[in-house]
Amino acid sequence: MGNKQKVDLLVIGSGPAGLSTALHLVKHDKSWADRIVIVERDSHPRPKLCGGGITRLGLDLLKDLGIAYPLPIPMVEVDDVRLVYSERTIHVRGKPQFVVVYRSDFDDYLAKLVQQSGIVIHENEEGKSLQSNEKYVTVETNKCTYHARAVVGADGSNGITRRFVNGPGQPNRVARLLEVITSAPENAAHFIDRFAHFDFTPVDEQLQGYAWVFPANINQQPSFNRGVYDARLARQRPRASLPNILADSMQTHFNEPYTTQLAGHPIHLFTPRNRLSVPRLLLAGDSAGVDPLFGEGISPALAYGKLAAITLKRAFQTGDFSFRDYRRRVLVSKLGWYLTLRWIIAWTCYHLSGKRRFMHTLWTVGGLLARVWPEPETLHSSKFHE
Ligand SMILES: Cc1cc2nc3c(=O)[nH]c(=O)nc-3n(C[C@H](O)[C@H](O)[C@H](O)COP(=O)(O)OP(=O)(O)OC[C@H]3O[C@@H](n4cnc5c(N)ncnc54)[C@H](O)[C@@H]3O)c2cc1C
């Protein structure tokens, strides 16, 4: 605790949000490498509960960072997203629509890139408390006291920075998730036909979300990543039983009894009213807010990192660390539109999803839209090298 260090930028957390912030800063100016310290309470490769689905938004951002496609880590491509309600299925196609990675591999790969660029990641170092004044933010960790000219709070949904920015008593919208990973046969249809399931049928059992099944490659083993997402946006409605819904989903899709160990984690949802900064500290990734419709957070975290980097560059150029413009910058960006649109759809649909007639109408309209909506451009590895 005796150590003290002055630093220009302290990033708390080395998930996709913190690592993307750092990579975007050094991409434009290598001298940032000596000005950033990242503290991470765990050490890479670290376990992370996550479906590992990275959509085209995230793949584009990785391309921005010079990370070639196909990604240089094990991944499974999903070309057919099956949105299921009762007996009805909407197919959303693209080559790929998204890819599934193992988060431990993905974050470790990004962390290595950050370290290769010269930035120090202090692993096994946990931010414990924050205080700020006009000149710097003081961050106490289990190993050091930092005086940072600016701080990025990329410490996830349960982190200290979100609480610091929001203060006590602010409403905190969180979704609940349960996940289970099991081995899969190599010839499973999900791998051959490259599809993933998002099953919304459990909205009939009060779920405000879906049960998912993703094909995955975990430690070189074909696997299924399955889970349940519950946005809980309509608070007045009864709570769904997530373990029961996951058990039913496993029975329906795999005819498997439900014997596996479950793990769960809440995630902090985006709303257009979320606070995203205080002077000298800005939030990125889950601490700022995740897509409320699907609970998608990896691609948004990469995008928040890019916006945080732009905001920080400007602050260090002008000496204005109020970060007053950060929220506006996020809301008017592609990320802001993406999250706001999903928040509107999520809010409307999860309030009405208990009505079967509404769900059938939604699937009729959605099915028509999916047929006429153009598929995204096919991703060829060569395109990423251009
Ligand atoms: C079950 C589940 C399934 C999901 N599936 C998907 C999916 O398929 N696709 C998708 O896009 N999103 C998914 N998400 C959401 C996704 O995992 C997150 O949105 C994403 O990890 C956000 O990245 P981040 O960098 O903001 O935070 P994190 O990835 O949570 O990283 C935060 C980092 O900060 C560190 N940290 C925390 N506190 C401190 C501290 N005090 N000091 C130092 N370090 C600290 C943590 O150890 C961690 O490394 C899922 C989430 C869950 C729970």
Image (cartoon, helix red, strand yellow):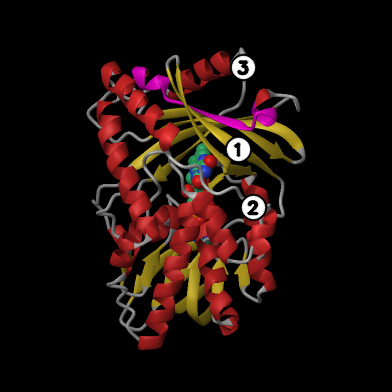
Residue 138 visible at all: no
What secondary structure is marked by label 2?
A: helix
Residue 254's mark?
3
- Asked if 244 appears above or below 119 in the picture, the reply is above
Instruction: Judge by depth and name the residue closer to the eye, 311 or 127.
Output: 311
- Spatial distance from mark 2 to mark 3, Cα to Cα? 28 Å
What residue appears at the point 65 percent right and 49 percent down from the top-left corner? 104
Give coordinates of residue 367: x percent, y percent: 40, 27
Instruction: Kindly identify which residue carries mark 1.
Output: 78
Using the rendered view, name the quadrant where residue 332 is placed.
Answer: bottom left
The C terminus lies in quadrant: bottom right
Which kind of residue does numbered mark 1 sit on?
A: Val
Q: State which region is magenta.
A: 190-204
What residue appears at the point 43 percent right and 39 percent down from the top-left corner? 373
In the drawing, does residue 309 fall left or right of residue 164? right
Which kind of residue does numbered mark 3 sit on?
A: Phe
What secondary structure is marked by label 3?
A: helix
Crowdedness of circle 1 by 10 Å Cα count: few (<14), some, many (20+)?
many
What residue appears at the point 58 percent right and 46 percent down from the top-left corner? 48
What secondary structure is marked by label 1?
A: strand
Which kind of residue does numbered mark 2 sit on?
A: Phe
Q: Earlier in the sequence, mark 2 or mark 1?
A: 1
Using the rendered view, name the quadrant where residue 30 is placed.
Answer: bottom right
